[in-house]
Amino acid sequence: MAAGLLFASLPAARAQAIDVFAGLNTLTAKQVTQIPKLNGGVFPSAGVELWIGAIGIGAEAAFRATTTTQNLRPAYYDANLLLSPFHITRSAWPELVVGVGY
């Protein structure tokens, strides 16, 4: 009886998940002072998220597949703190994201 009460009072185990993703993006921006103009192009990207319950951390990186007219290959990356407060359905839920990147 004591063992049954002990297990009944323990909180439910939190789920863990790792999400890995890849994609193709595009970006267009006007030239501002010293920063060169980005005329679109394909930016392959990849990232990972680690979830422990409703809280997670993530990182993503993207780079331009071809060089620009100035012979540059821009790259962008970010790191994020994620929060998923509730699930709408089993496969759909909102994510609140705060992060830093370059």
Image (spheres, grey):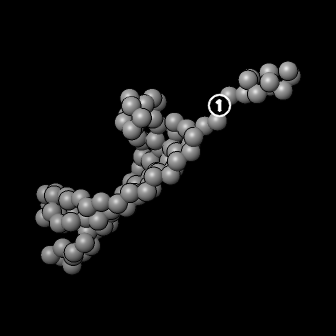
User: Where is residue 96, by image quadrant?
Assistant: top left
Q: Residue furthest front?
A: 1
**Looking at the image, which is closer to me, 64 or 16?**
16
Where does label 1 land, which residue? 12
**Looking at the image, which is closer to me, 55 or 10?**
10
31 shown above or below 81: below
Q: Secondary structure at mark 1?
A: loop
Q: Say which residue appears at 60% left-offset and 37% top-offset.
A: 14
- The answer to whether residue 30 shows anywhere in this view is yes
**Looking at the image, which is closer to me, 17 or 3?**
3
User: Where is residue 12, by image quadrant?
Assistant: top right
Q: Say which residue appears at 52% left-offset and 47% top-offset.
A: 17
Q: Residue furthest bottom?
A: 71
Quadrant (top left/top right/bottom left/bottom right) for the N terminus: top right
Q: Say which residue appears at 42% left-offset and 41% top-offset.
A: 98
User: Which amino acid type is shown beneath numbered disc 1?
Assistant: Ala
Q: Position of residue 65 (x, y in %)?
A: 25, 72
